[in-house]
Image (cartoon, grey):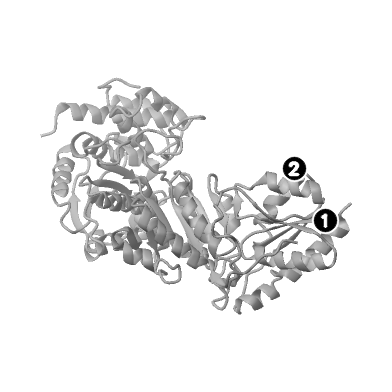
Amino acid sequence: MKKFINQGNKDTRSGFGEGLTQLGRNNSEVVALCADLTGSLKMNTFADENPERFFQVGIAEANMIGLAAGLATGGKIPFTGTFANFSTGRVYDQIRQSVAYSNKNVKICASHAGITLGEDGATHQILEDIGLMKMLPGMTVINTCDFNQTKSATLEICNFDGPVYLRFGRPKVANFTDPRDRFQIGKGVLLNEGSDVTIVATGHLVWEAIHAAEKLHENGINAEIINIHTIKPLDEDIILNSVNKTGCLVSAEEHNIYGGLGESIARLLTSKAPYPQEFVGTKDTFGESGTPVDLMNKYGLNSDSIIEAVTRVLKRKA
Amino acid sequence: MISEELNKLVIQTRRDILRMVHAVNSGHPGGSLGCVEFFVTLYNRIMNHDGDNNSKDIFILSNGHISPVYYSTLARSGYFDVKELDTFRKINSRLQGHPTNHDNLPGVNISSGSLGQGLSVGLGVALSKKLNNDNSIVYVLTGDGELQEGQNWEAFMYASANKVDNIIVTVDYNGQQIDGSTKDVLDIGNLKLKLESFNWKVFEIENGNSLDEVYRTMSEAKKSCMKGKPIVILMKTIMGNGVDFMMHTHKWHGVAPNDEQLEEALNQNPETLGDY
């Protein structure tokens, strides 16, 4: 089992903030918009350094998406920032018509995604946003796993022409990917090779998948771990190559099992490689207040839940 | 003074609208006919336009359902062949029921139809022009019923607070919407006072179906650009204008004329510049 080293806990939103700061210095076409959450989104440095290219829109997310579509029409590369809930569900039709259907080069950057937003509770958490965004034709959907990956994703989506949903989180979590890794949209990352089971994880669940694999390894089970940061377009090859070798798969995400990464994988497996799959995710429920760790434990979004899913799927393996 | 040519274009545009919606027995003739004089004036006397060049004036249609008048104007301004008007609302057409840039129709920069979004988009384009030190103007048309959508008021608030003064928004103030008069459905009250209190400079056009009046006020509005305030024009129009039995009613909002009605409507607007 490959060793993974935590370089120190950091929040993914700070990775976004650093990436955006760098973009502000290197690309004069980049503009940023925020709906009264500049500090939470770590957009302060960009705002301070580029006051003319930063648009504080107030608590008015619908207008923010429209402004971004207009700025893109004028040739700019807009990055919008607010919580994931207010970035998606609140403005779904604005994104659908003015951004996705209109092919606008808008980067919708969403912090505080999932249940790890924590104490603010279900009104501010969202566990449906991946589903909402992946259903939009032409929308690229990315969910990064740590600080380094979020920073490199932020830089890379600027080079990509088209609408992107970039999802990241609030809490400080392990920072373990190599900062020199080039972020490739649509390319999964094979973290660990194994022969018994494939674990495909995204976002905060990638670190949990690594923990799970370590414990499984102690018990003689070799898990292959794939870090899927791009949920759409899905890297089908990396998943098929792995599952054709291992014969079973567990998906893990901080999202409802309906509409998330797991369902995208299930569609792939049923049409091309019908091996058993088990799902780690929330089970069609809203979240609640609590610390991120307590919530992850209560809602089954941790390494133990992944190990249980692996145990189940191994029993179903022919 | 408005030339005879523009009058001819108005009549021909009405014919295009009527024939387009009749051919597919669907679409929105009422609001389209009400805005013919506005479109003809905007594209022929007011805007310095080139839909594919962002350094020129740009037009955003927010009330996308009046696509027939938009398409006819674009075609007759040379953006695409007038023959393409025949594909309106048919399968494999770039002329969708509601306008979209999704299929690369020249002259159209954004999709609209789901109401209340065009003003925000127009403001975004205006902001991009300011960043580029480009002094051209963004024109937006919205309906009046459409102002019931809350997003517009987010945008009104944003524009004045941020002194977006390179935009001219025109409200098609026809007082009608699908379910009846705007007063009955959801009264939007004193729009002039509302917008003035939002710190917009408000112009009024008493007769938005007069080429002269539209031209005069739009020209005046243009001169008021770049002076620190966003500009809105409340343009009173008559839905269904130019076809007597379609005027002054919301009944023709989204209903196409039948064969006899088409003939009668076309007789009131004899061919001037050649049908498509």
Where does label 1 land, which residue? A196
Residue B169 seen by the camera:
no
Q: Secondary structure at mark 1?
A: loop
Q: Which residue is mark 2?
A: A271
**The disc numbered 1 marks a residue on which chain?**
A
Q: Residues within 10 Å of mark 1 (few under 14, many from 20)?
A: many
B265 left or right of A312? left
The x and y percentages for residue B108 are: 36, 38
Tally of numbered discs: 2
Q: Quadrant of the N terminus of chain B?
A: top left
Identify the mark nearer the N-term, 2 or 1.
1
Q: Quadrant of residue B80?
A: top left
Q: Which chain is indicated by disc 2?
A: A
Which residue shows up at 45% across the image and 60% down it?
A: A19
Q: In the rendered structure, find residue A39 and report the number of the disc placed on it.
A: none
Q: Secondary structure at mark 2?
A: helix
Amino acid residing under circle 1: Asp
Residue at point 35% right, 54% down?
A: B120
Query: How far across and down, in percent of the image, does residue A231 sit?
Result: 61, 52
